[in-house]
Image (tube, rainbow, N blue to C red):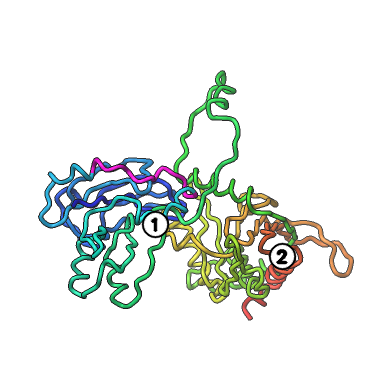
């Protein structure tokens, strides 16, 4: 029986996407792993691979189609011996419940393999239908694997190649919930309807700007963050003169290598080392428990047109300043081109948002769940300060505010983390020891 190819969830927050480009056409033969299409998610443009083999019998969603819900049928795959005449039943099948929110999909996903319709396949000894791809059935027959003993991880619980191979190694596992993002994006608070707001401005000239996927995701996640995370804020001023002098010296020595360190590179390193010095703060909120991380994976907010990314620099405490600088430049460039893979902007326990280059003295940043905190960095400004001898002097001072999730980090513990960050930045040579 023909098999539906469904719109995949290519990121945890993806509810719908744009089918930017088909890389195959009707009549093409494809194998598992072949590229089928380019799909624009709420964060990036990604390539979508086939999980089964067969012939593309019909393309159901045209190139350029926007707002295609996750789990919507986008094409039909034919098995050996099937023709386009067999597609009628598949195209007429009811669409999966993809229009529901991620939160609504999650509890239903457990029952999906048993409840949702799936392609025809062999039956078990009890007469129950077994849903498996042609490739999975062929491998199972060759290896003597009983498909009835497996639980599929494909769409609607369908058994795919990886399930059979895993069973061959003695590692058949229950299927993970599929088809929906891993975390709920939250619901926006109730307020005036769109029509009510438009009525307020009916006599004023305005432009109606539709929200794209990224803007919708940012709105939902930040609303969720402010509604569900008990934020508290810790503020400090940091004297930058020693760091600026040290940075200048290093950049002169690194000039031949084409390396130029930024103040932000030092901030990343300072935060990564501080998380190691105060390990109880290197943690994330996991619903009903706290996960304490061992590596320092630091996320850094990067502004792009229409939104932002937070690429993660993993093991930042173990990397040199020059390595962090090169990696950050690469991640930022690809973020602006929306070419980051999900694993490059997911994870981390702590984040940095730096608006100092825009002349902002200080601000409060919103925590990006499940992170335990985020450091908002302002501009370095020359200010009068009182020296240790009581004399007035002029110093370059940078104001920072650390937003903290009180469920993960208490006030005194957060103060210790911020103190460690301050010490690292005011004594930068210590970070190289």
| Residue furthest to the bottom | 433
SS class, disc 1: loop
Q: How far across and down, in percent of the image, does residue 83 sit?
A: 11, 49
**In front: mark 1 or mark 2?**
1
Q: Quadrant of the C terminus?
A: bottom right
Task: Give above or below for 204 relative to 354.
Answer: above
User: What residue is at 47 percent from the left and 56 percent from the top?
Assistant: 182
| Residue furthest to the right | 390
User: What residue is at 76 percent from the left and 66 percent from the top?
Assistant: 412
**Mark 2 lies on residue:** 414
User: What residue is at 69 percent from the left and 54 percent from the top?
Assistant: 231
Question: Where on the picture, by quarter, is residue 178?
Answer: bottom left
- Label drawn at residue 279: none
| Residue furthest to the top | 203
Dominant SS in magenta: loop
| Residue furthest to the front | 126
Q: How far across and down, in percent of the image, does residue 360 sit?
A: 66, 49
SS class, disc 2: helix
Q: If you read the primary sequence from the N terminus, does the residue marked by circle 1 or circle 2 appear first?
A: 1
- Viewer-side residue, 398 vs 2: 2
Residue 198 is inside the magenta segment: no
- Viewer-side residue, 255 vs 66: 66
Query: Could you tell me if residue 377 is visible in this image?
Result: yes
- Viewer-side residue, 423 vs 295: 295
Q: CA distance from mark 1 to mark 2?
A: 37 Å
**Mark 1 lies on residue:** 178
- Viewer-side residue, 203 vs 262: 203
Q: Magenta segment range?
A: 91-103
User: What residue is at 44 percent from the left and 44 percent from the top?
Assistant: 100
Task: Give above or below for 292 relative to 212.
Answer: below
């Amino acid at each position: 029986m023909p098999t539906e190819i469904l719109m995949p969830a290519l990121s945890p927050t993806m509810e719908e996407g744009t089918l930017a480009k088909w890389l195959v056409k009707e009549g093409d033969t494809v194998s598992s792993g072949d590229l089928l299409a380019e799909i624009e998610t709420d964060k990036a443009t990604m390539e979508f691979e086939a999980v089964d083999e067969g012939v593309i019998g019909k393309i159901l969603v045209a190139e350029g189609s926007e707002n295609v819900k996750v789990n919507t049928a986008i094409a039909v795959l034919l098995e050996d011996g099937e023709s386009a005449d067999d597609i009628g039943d598949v195209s007429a099948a009811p669409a999966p419940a993809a229009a529901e929110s991620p939160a609504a999909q999650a509890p239903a996903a457990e029952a999906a393999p048993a409840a949702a319709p799936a392609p025809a396949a062999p039956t078990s000894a009890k007469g129950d239908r077994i849903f498996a791809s042609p490739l999975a059935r062929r491998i199972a027959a060759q290896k003597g694997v009983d498909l009835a003993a497996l639980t599929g991880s494909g769409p609607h619980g369908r058994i795919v190649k990886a399930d059979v191979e895993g069973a061959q190694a003695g590692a058949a596992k229950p299927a993970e919930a599929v088809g929906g993002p891993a975390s709920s994006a939250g619901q926006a608070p109730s307020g005036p309807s769109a029509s009510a707001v438009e009525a307020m401005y009916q006599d004023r000239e305005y432009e109606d700007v539709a929200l794209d996927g990224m803007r919708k995701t940012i709105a939902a996640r930040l609303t969720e963050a402010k509604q569900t995370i008990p934020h508290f804020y810790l503020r400090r001023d940091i004297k930058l003169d020693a760091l600026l002098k040290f940075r200048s010296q290093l950049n002169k020595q690194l000039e031949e290598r084409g390396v130029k360190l930024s103040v932000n590179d030092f901030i990343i390193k300072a935060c990564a080392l501080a998380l190691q010095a105060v390990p109880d703060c290197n943690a994330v909120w996991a619903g009903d428990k706290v996960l304490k991380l061992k590596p320092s994976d630091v996320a850094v907010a990067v502004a792009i047109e229409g939104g932002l990314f937070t690429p993660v620099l993993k093991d930042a405490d173990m990397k040199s300043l020059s390595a962090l600088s090169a990696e950050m430049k690469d991640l930022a460039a690809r973020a602006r081109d929306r070419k980051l893979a999900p694993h490059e902007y997911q994870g981390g326990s702590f984040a940095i948002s730096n608006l100092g280059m825009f002349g902002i003295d200080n601000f409060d940043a919103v925590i990006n769940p499940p992170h335990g905190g985020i450091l908002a960095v302002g501009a370095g400004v020359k200010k009068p300060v009182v020296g240790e001898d009581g004399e007035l002097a002029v110093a370059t001072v940078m104001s920072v505010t650390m937003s903290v999730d009180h469920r993960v980090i208490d006030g005194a513990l957060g103060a210790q983390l911020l103190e460690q960050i301050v010490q690292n930045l005011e004594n930068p040579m210590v970070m190289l020891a």
